[in-house]
Amino acid sequence: MPLHTIVGAGPLGTALARLLAESGEEVRVVTRSGGGPRHPRIERVRADASGPAALTRAASGAAALYNCANPPSYTQWERDWPPLAASLLHAAEETGAVLVVAGNLYGYGPVDGPMHRDLPLAATDHKGRLRARMWQEALDRHEAGAIRAVEVRSSDYIGAVAPLSSYVVFYAEQAFQGRTVRTFGRWDLPHTVTYVPDVARTLAAAATDERAWGRAWHVPSPPALTVRAMVADLVREGGARGPRVRRFPRPLLRAALPFSPFLREMGELLYQWDRPYLLDAGVTTETFGIEATPWEEIVRETARWIRDGARTP
């Protein structure tokens, strides 16, 4: 069976590794700690993926190399992403593995209307410009014939995700604890969220289908709901009382930005919560037949995850 090398063992890397292993594929998970999910078909490798030689060894013999890594904090993106992205490009070129990038929507910047994959990458913040630059570098190498590359873009995660990695899970956890939910942006506008297992399914499909290569694809996601409605559904499923939702005062948040590097980074992304944030993944469904998991199932599994303690898988 083909070998798949996955960089990162967070929620997405774990879900993808399990999906591939349970379908009979051989999987190699690369992390600095040597951790990752346990399965007879999963080999866990301890290595620094930002080192080209180490990653090339780990990707040797692989049909696909997946970038499912993510720096632990926004404040580390500019330091951690460039060497890792360069290492991934090097390993893909040396081994011939298809480079499959798990991306997001930051590169589009503020837009009016649903986001589709043909929109220009016009980010206004440095994190979005960084992600756009990483994809452009991979695409340039693809078009030059040096590698084969594809990017799969999703919105904010929902599912078995640590609360600090998902605003909706973070808000729902507050509600489960009986606390007032304090949102950073408006809670009355529709906002697309993407279920982690659906991201994994789309990554796996893009890795092995030549029609996917050289393009970006959006992950099919459930119909967008307001933050209030999403949290209410999760709380109702978990058997807790209905949430009290309040918006964190924007002037107070702005005043705190100079004193917190994390809040400064987050402040650049507040536009995502001040207007409808909608993802159009119709082309992905038409091409690969992938459809979003029904919202009811997503709510059931996410509520169980939060109720059980919501830790990083």
Image (cartoon, rainbow, N blue to C red):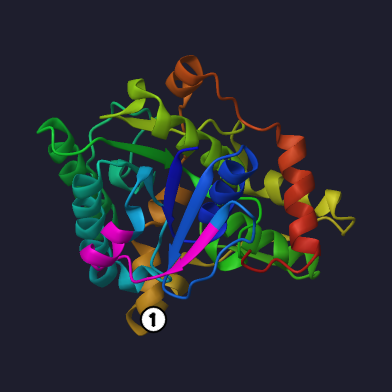
**Residue that carries the numbered disc 1 in the rendered image:** 260
Residue range highlighted in magenta: 43-57
Viewer-nearest residue: 133 or 241? 133
Q: Is residue 79 visible?
A: yes
Q: Check disc 1 and give the amino acid type.
A: Ser
Whether residue 185 appears in magenta in the rendering, the answer is no
Q: Position of residue 69 (x, y in %)?
A: 41, 59
Residue at image point 61% right, 65% down: 163
Q: Which residue is outermost to the left?
A: 144
Q: Is residue 278 visible?
A: no
Mark 1: few, some, or many residues within 10 Å (few <14, many ≥20)? few
Q: Position of residue 213 (x, y in %)?
A: 30, 29
Q: Is residue 249 left or right of residue 40?
A: left
Quarter assignment of residue 256: bottom left
Q: Position of residue 74 (x, y in %)?
A: 37, 68
Q: Is residue 45 above or below residue 156?
A: below
Quarter assignment of residue 142: top left
Viewer-nearest residue: 27 or 122? 27
Residue at image point 60% right, 43% down: 19
Viewer-nearest residue: 234 or 309? 309
